Amino acid sequence: MKEFLVISTLGSDRPGIANAISQLVTESHCNIDDSRMTVLGGEFAVLMLVSGAKENIDALDHNLLATANALELTTLTKRTNTRTAEYTERPYTVQVVALDNQGIIHEIASFFSKQGINIENMDTETYAAPHTGSPMFSLSMTVNLSENIQISLLREEFITFCDDRNLDSSIEPLK
């Protein structure tokens, strides 16, 4: 029977971290089912879902501590189960671009939470606008909409919500 382990790792950005962790997973006879890796400031962050036989997951979980210590990483692991997909859910992509303002992520997350909509994935970044150098904000996320949500009404409410905050936005089916 397959078991699942979520690994969260954070450490100073440098070459070799992804290699060391993926090598340990492979040597433990486990598989990386899903992962996100990114640099945030000067830190490299890894979030990974690994699967394998119970004894292999146990060994990986145990051996990860030594690898993390050697690489000076902060690591957290948690056993989990697979997520059962709702066949009635429809994935949509949400895009937002605006001048950067404190609280944008919270306001957007709150909008979807109040609608009972699950955020599946979210990526945000700030950057300097071309020519002006103004601080800009960009958000891209995937949400799952249940069959009882009317997309036309949701889209209208979201566009109004964003217009009130001077955010350029779109909500479209995931392609």
Image (spheres, rainbow, N blue to C red):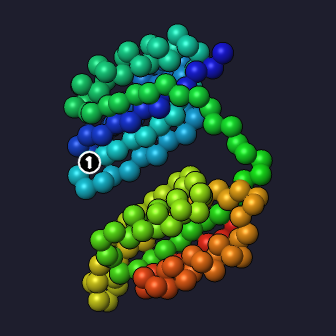
* SS of the residue under disc 1: strand
Residue 95 appearing in the image: yes
Point out the image quarter for the C terminus: bottom right
Residue 82's x, y, as percent?
62, 32
Give the answer, above or below, for where 89 lies relative to 166.
above
Left or right: where 69 falls relative to 18: left
Amino acid at pointer 1 = Glu
Residue 143's x, y, as percent?
60, 59
Few, some or many C-alpha atoms within 10 Å of disc 1 (few <14, some 14-19, many ≥20)? Answer: some
Residue drawn at point x = 47 percent, y = 37 percent: 48
Left or right: where 74 falls relative to 18: left
Q: Please count the marks in the image.
A: 1
Give the answer, above or below, for where 10 lies relative to 157.
above
Give the answer, above or below, for where 55 lies relative to 86.
above
Residue drawn at point x = 22 percent, y = 31 percent: 72
The residue labelled by disc 1 is 43
Residue 7's x, y, as percent?
42, 32
Residue drawn at point x = 77 percent, y = 47 percent: 87
Closer to the camera, 115 or 83?
115
Residue 127 appearing in the image: no
